[in-house]
């Protein structure tokens, strides 16, 4: 028997799992009941979440009571707020800010951008940025305002001060075979945007007869043949220098900026 047991031990025979001693506490750990403290924490989290939801949606603590508009110039806050149609009395958290922005941009083209922000606990803020006209198109006795991106955004009865008129005299222009009137309008806007501030203030008319024929009509009977919209920054610098060098000239040609010309008095 001793030899047999010695042989079994040497052969490394393992005892069945059922006969192995379990680790202390292993079986009990599998069926452990959560501690009361864990249950209390979980219950507290649920109650807190329910309280927050009720406060935001069910209580009167965070309801829309006022709307404040800023950034308007031509538009009035009343016009903006009427279109925005912010739901007064609704839970502040439920206000669809994207829908309000979309309504304002669609109904009021003068608005370039608008930020609709929640002002806790009771307000909605409408931060408006209006488009600024850089050119005017005449339409009968009225004027169509054109912004720096070429967008025609409003028709007004009176021309805003300091905004030059745009004359698109392109009906017989060969440029129309390649560029439509909207493209030529865009070229005029591009030229206007590259004018030095002092020259821009004195510009009364931007006349376009073809893609490569843009003329500026300034105050005091002066005019500038700009040519195409290409090389605008260079032409602007050359024109500034040319006007300083010939202050009594009436005609300036910077269509070829490497060979500018001034003439007349």
Image (tube, grey):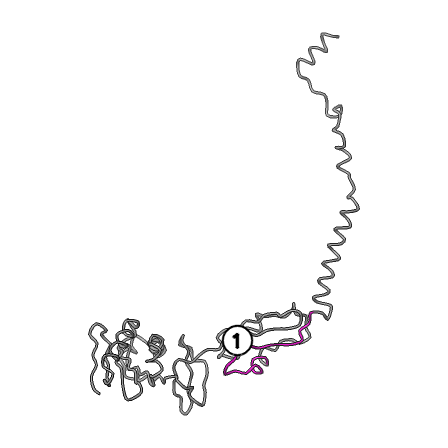
Pinpoint residue 228: horizontal percent, then vertical percent.
28, 75
Horizontal side of residue 263 vs 38, given as left or right: left
Q: Is residue 75 magenta?
A: yes
| Quadrant (top left/top right/bottom left/bottom right) for the C terminus | bottom left
Looking at the picture, tell me which residue is in the foreground, 229 or 7: 229
Q: Which residues are magenta?
A: 62-81
Q: Is residue 27 magenta?
A: no
Q: Residue at x 70, y 67 (%)?
A: 57
Mark 1 sits on what residue? 128
Horizontal side of residue 204 vs 9, given as left or right: left
Q: Secondary structure at mark 1?
A: strand
State the image quarter where residue 17 is shown: top right
Looking at the picture, tell me which residue is in the foreground, 49 or 245: 245
- Give the residue at the far bottom of this rendering: 141
Pinpoint residue 114: horizontal percent, then vertical percent.
53, 73
State the image quarter where residue 4 is shown: top right
Is 171 drawn above or below residue 231 in the view shown? below
């Amino acid at each position: 028997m001793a030899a047999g047991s010695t042989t079994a031990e040497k052969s490394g025979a393992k005892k069945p799992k059922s006969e192995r001693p379990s680790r202390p506490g292993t079986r009990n750990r599998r069926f452990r009941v959560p501690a009361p403290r864990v249950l209390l924490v979980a219950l507290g989290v649920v109650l807190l979440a329910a309280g927050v939801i009720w406060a935001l949606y069910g209580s009167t603590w965070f309801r829309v009571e006022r709307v404040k508009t800023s950034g308007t110039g031509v538009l009035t806050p009343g016009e903006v707020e009427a279109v925005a149609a912010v739901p007064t009395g609704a839970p502040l958290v439920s206000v669809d800010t994207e829908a309000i922005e979309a309504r304002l941009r669609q109904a009021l083209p003068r608005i370039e951008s608008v930020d609709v922000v929640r002002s806790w606990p009771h307000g909605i803020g409408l931060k408006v940025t209006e488009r600024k006209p850089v050119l005017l198109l005449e339409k009968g006795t009225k004027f169509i305002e054109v912004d720096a991106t070429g967008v025609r955004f409003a028709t007004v009865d009176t021309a805003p001060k300091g905004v030059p008129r745009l004359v698109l005299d392109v009906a017989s222009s060969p440029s129309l075979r390649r560029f439509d009137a909207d493209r030529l309008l865009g070229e005029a806007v591009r030229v206007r945007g590259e004018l030095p501030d002092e020259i821009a203030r004195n510009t009364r008319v931007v006349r376009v007869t073809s893609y490569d024929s843009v003329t500026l009509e300034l105050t005091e009977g002066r005019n500038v043949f700009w040519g195409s919209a290409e090389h605008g920054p260079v032409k602007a610098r050359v024109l500034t220098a040319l006007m300083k060098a010939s202050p009594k000239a009436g005609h300036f040609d910077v269509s070829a900026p490497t060979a500018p010309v001034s003439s007349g008095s």
